[in-house]
Every structure is written in C-alpha cells, then in structure tokens.
Amino acid sequence: MNIKYTVKDVYTVKDVACSIEAFAPLSRQEKWDNCGLQTGSFSAPVTSVLLGLDCTPELVDEAVAVGADLIVTHHPLIFGGLKRVTPDDPVGLAIIKAVRSGISIYSAHTSADKVIGGVSGAMAQRLSLRNVRVLDPEQDGQGLGAVGDLPSAVTAAEAVEMVKRAFNLKSVRTSRPIEGMISRVALCGGSGSSLIPQAIDSGAQLYLCGDISYHHFFTSGDFMLMDVGHYESEIDIVNILFSLIKKNFPTFAVRITENIYSNPIFYF
C-alpha cells in the first residue's frame, strides 16, 4: 500500500511515519513492543532521513554530521520503562544527543516483522523460497515468520552451506543434522524460538531464526534448527524501509548509515 502525497514545501515526521505505517501498521506490533516515535515531535519538519538497524549514540552522531532531521530504525531505542536518562548508558546517551540536536527517532520493529514483505519475507527471498506464506498468521492473515519451499530439495550439509552463502555467514549453529532431504524451510527474523512448534506443524524440515537457546537444539530426527543470528536475520529491513521512504519522498536526502554493522555480538 502506498500513500500519495501532494508536493508541498515542508514534510513532517508525521508524513514519514504515515508512509511507514501504511506498510507496517502500529496496530500489528506485539503487546510488549514499542514501535513508533521514540523521541521528537510528529510536527517537526523533515528534509533528511538516516536509517539503521539499531539507534546507537554513534548513529545519532552520524545523523548530526549529515544533517538528518529523522532517524528510522528497526529496533526501538526505548523498549521498557526508563527510570532515568543519563549519558552513562547507550540508550540514555542516544536520547540526550537526539533531543539536544532536535532529531526525531522512529522505529518499526514487530510492526515490520508481521508483514510478509518485511523481515521474514526478506529472509525467504535470500533463499529463493517458493509458495511463501506467513508461518503464524493472525486473523487478518498477517503475522510472524514465513514458510516456503526450496527450488529443489537439499541435504542437511548442503542446507548449511546454502544458508551460510545466502546470509554471508562464516559459521552457523545447528541442531543435529537430519538424514532426510530438506525441501521446506520456515523462518523468523530475530528471536524466533517461540515459533518452533509452528515451524514443525508447517511441515518444514528446517527452521531458521536467531537467539536459539541450548535446550531448543534437542530436536526430533526429522526436524532441524539453524541459528543464523539476530542481526544477520533482520538486517534486510533497513533496505526495505530505505526504499519505501525514498519512493514516497524522492526529494529527501535518504541515507543508510555508513556504519551499518551495529551487531553487539562479536565472533572470534
């Protein structure tokens, strides 16, 4: 769904928010989530937007340096109730820098997870899945995760190499490799352990997500889990939001952060 805007001299944070919410409505977000405006004002004018996965203090510094009025991220800057805002932690420091510089921050998290053209749909595209549908649909047909069929069946060893290539991974964590062929794959960006039962019920032989805990790796003989990483499974949403804003506001200076790798997990 695209919103058509009449050309005007000044666009606001509200205009950009409406364009994002036409794609990823706030009503879809999980109850525990905090999508939407994080800092700033809906009435603030916007001429330049900077996008990233996480709103770090460094991202705010970059926004100041390039003259961005608005930061758009996937992960919300503010998740739970804040008891204090100080420069001693990254969230407080980012808030202070944004407010001081007059920069608004907007986040589309589970609202963008629960549309098939969002996070999980992008994962499915990386694997060229066919017949893709929502893994855990709600009443309106949208929901978390995706499931689809591979162009051709592969062995577990072939699936590991295929996923590593598709997601640019040096390594991947998996459960015990299954002996049969893999033809159907379920996916969920970010922390997806809660959808393991749905992945099994979908008929998938392989389920990809992030943040899988130790005990979840004890699987049955015909089902395999693969942890591709939280950051790695969600990063495509930045390009999706970039394209959306650029299309609706072609006169904007829309940028993706030069320091896109905000993954807090280090691999050695």
Image (spheres, rainbow, N blue to C red):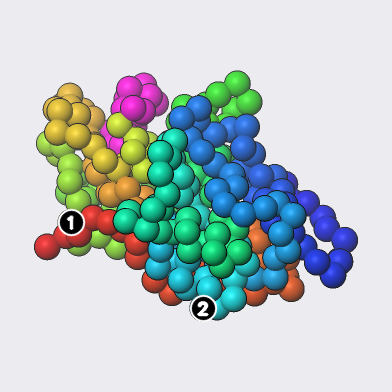
What amino acid is labelled 2 in the image? Ala
Quarter of the image holding residue 36?
A: top right
Q: Is residue 207 magenta?
A: yes
Which of 234 and 17 lies nearest the eye of the viewer?
17
> Is the residue 217 above or below the residue 171 in the image?
above
Question: What residue did someone put label 1 on?
Answer: 171
Q: Which element is circle 2 on?
A: helix
- Residue 122: give x, y in percent of width and height: 47, 51
> Is the residue 122 above or below the residue 243 in the image?
above
Q: Do we see residue 254 in this rendering?
A: no
> Is the residue 43 above or below the residue 249 in the image?
above
- Does label 2 or label 1 sit earlier along the sequence? 2
Which of 33 and 147 lies nearest the eye of the viewer?
33
Q: Is residue 135 magenta?
A: no
Name the residue rendered at 60%, 47% in the picture.
Answer: 37
Quarter of the image holding residue 252?
A: bottom right
Name the residue rendered at 35%, 65% in the picture.
Answer: 261
Query: The C terminus lies in which quarter of the figure?
Result: bottom left
Which of 28 and 61 lies nearest the eye of the viewer?
61
Q: Which residues are magenta?
A: 194-208
Tell me, for residue 65, which label it has, or none: 2
Q: Residue furthest bottom?
A: 65
